[in-house]
Image (tube, rainbow, N blue to C red):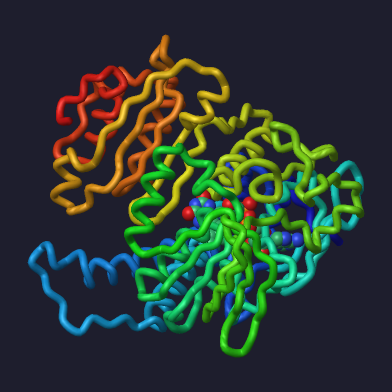
Amino acid sequence: MSKQFDVVVIGGGPGGYIAAIRAAQLGFNTACIDEWKNDKGGPAPGGTCTNVGCIPSKALLQSSEHFEHAGHGFADHGISMNDLKIDIAKMIGRKDAVVKQNNDGILYLFKKNKVTFFHGRGAFAAAKDGGYEIAVTGAAAETLQAKHVIIATGSNARQLPGAPFDEVNILSNDGALRIPAVPKKLGVIGSGVIGLEMGSVWRRLGAEVTILEALPAFLGAADESVAKEAAKVFKKQGLNIELGVKISAVENGKDGVSVKYTDAKGAEQTLAVDKLIISIGRVANTIGLNPEAVGLKLDERGAIVVDGDCKTNLPNVWAIGDVVRGPMLAHKAEEEGVAVAERIAGQHGHVNFNTIPWVIYTSPEIAWVGRTEQQLKADGVAYKAGQFPFLANGRARALGDTTGFVKFLADAKTDEILGVHIIGPMASELISEAVVAMEFKASAEDIARICHAHPSLSEATKEAALAVDKRTLNF
Ligand code: FAD
């Protein structure tokens, strides 16, 4: 006999596990199926984000930043370090331990919230009795009967044709997070978030890093002034970034990888590296889901087709996160998970796509919310801009980290905040104030009139809001 559930969630990444917890909180008998295995073959829920994405990348960024500070930054503080060394195996081991804490935390949360967890692959078997039959294969082979299904099967790294990942020399994000020794030369194809973060980790540890990017503009999604500042800083740090390249061939040999490409000036070039990370985007994952069994509609790129409420073409089947349209971000997946569970409960689940923050955890960090200056121009919106540099912020000076600025964009007439762009220390944390402000439709003047603690980096946010009206106090 099949086990009956109100809600079955397929995929236990940030979208799926959060959706399952919220559904259980709302009183639904809920199951979550996830197939990710740890190195012992056991369950490792948390998806890409926990296992080979957000969490391990931040763990390595932290370790490599400590190493870089110890090597260079500490000297200014009068701290000298002799014979500085890095034990890569220990660093990777620490990263793995952080991942495991998160995997275990999710299993604990499932228990606490009475979500039934199945370790295995979930696939549609049939539409039956007004619901769906889901076959689980793997460690927990079962057939489940679901009234509602939430698909949260995530995404996989996009392959570059002719350069298959072997995770030894040609690496996806997975291999890039467990290189056993610092490569002398590291190539990265793609200068998006993942390429920049991974490139930064290994550069800080001593690799000579070259990033090859097909697009002519650097960080095209960011505000132009932020992208310009970032390009300047990264170059100074020693990241070689080549824009407008066309890759013609990638050869994986026993001594490393050779990348043939045409540079922006049309000249043929070859880049020889020990390891090559390919980070050219991610593709929606429906492998093994068997969407054909129930007629679930996918688009031409393989993503599940959903409406603004994450409803698929099938009644009571929903899809969230990386497997659907929209930004491939963990917090976007989580918000959709909560919203869908609430919609199933007849509530008004809500995701505001205009206030989803973007963060790049390089040093300096880059974060933004809302529209860029170039988007406002293209949309014909009259706006005012205000900018404040961290160089003029007391806390940033005390930290010894004065790179970058906070920039506000506000409606010329109403002063409503339309976008906030930050490059600098702790941008990932500072952006939350801007998200809250935009969610509440605040004006720049609202932020300018709020008391911010002194000395704090957040004073730069207040000053940038004051700058919109040309009233900065400290610059
Ligand atoms: P996923 O996290 O991919 O989870 C899907 C899960 O479903 C997986 O566990 C998979 O095994 C399972 N699954 C798939 N098919 C089946 C099936 N048929 N049956 C059972 N289980 C199945 N985002 C951020 O917001 N911040 C960051 O800092 C950040 N850093 C990143 C760094 C890297 C290197 C990478 C690669 C990504 C990063 N991301 C970051 C993106 C983030 O990881 C994704 O947006 C997020 O994981 C998407 O969540 P999801 O739940 O949709 O899918």
Q: Is residue 282 left or right of residue 411?
A: right
Residue 419 position in % (x across, y down): 44, 29
Quarter placement of the N terminus: bottom right
- Give the answer, above or below, for where 83 lies relative to 144: below
Q: Nearer the viewer, residue 37 or 467?
A: 467
Residue 358 position in % (x across, y down): 48, 43
Residue 58 falls in which quadrant of the image? bottom left
Q: Look at the image and tell me whether residue 138 can be seen.
A: yes
* Residue extending furthest toward the top: 413
Image label count: 0
Please tell me which residue is depicted at 27% across the width and 82% down the height of the picture.
Answer: 85
Please tell me which residue is depicted at 77% across the width and 46% down the height of the picture.
Answer: 304
Q: Nearer the viewer, residue 130 or 50?
A: 50
Please tell me which residue is depicted at 42% across the width and 33% down the height of the picture.
Answer: 435
Please tell me which residue is depicted at 66% across the width and 38% down the height of the picture.
Answer: 340
* Residue extending furthest toward the bottom: 254
Q: Is residue 196 left or right of residue 340?
A: left
- Give the answer, above or below, for where 380 lies relative to 281: above
- Give the answer, above or below, for where 341 lies relative to 268: above
Residue 189 position in % (x across, y down): 58, 64
Quarter placement of the C terminus: top left
Residue 165 falls in which quadrant of the image? bottom right
Ligand 1, image quadrant it occupies = bottom right
Q: Look at the image and tell me whether residue 110 can be seen.
A: no
Residue 472 position in % (x across, y down): 20, 25
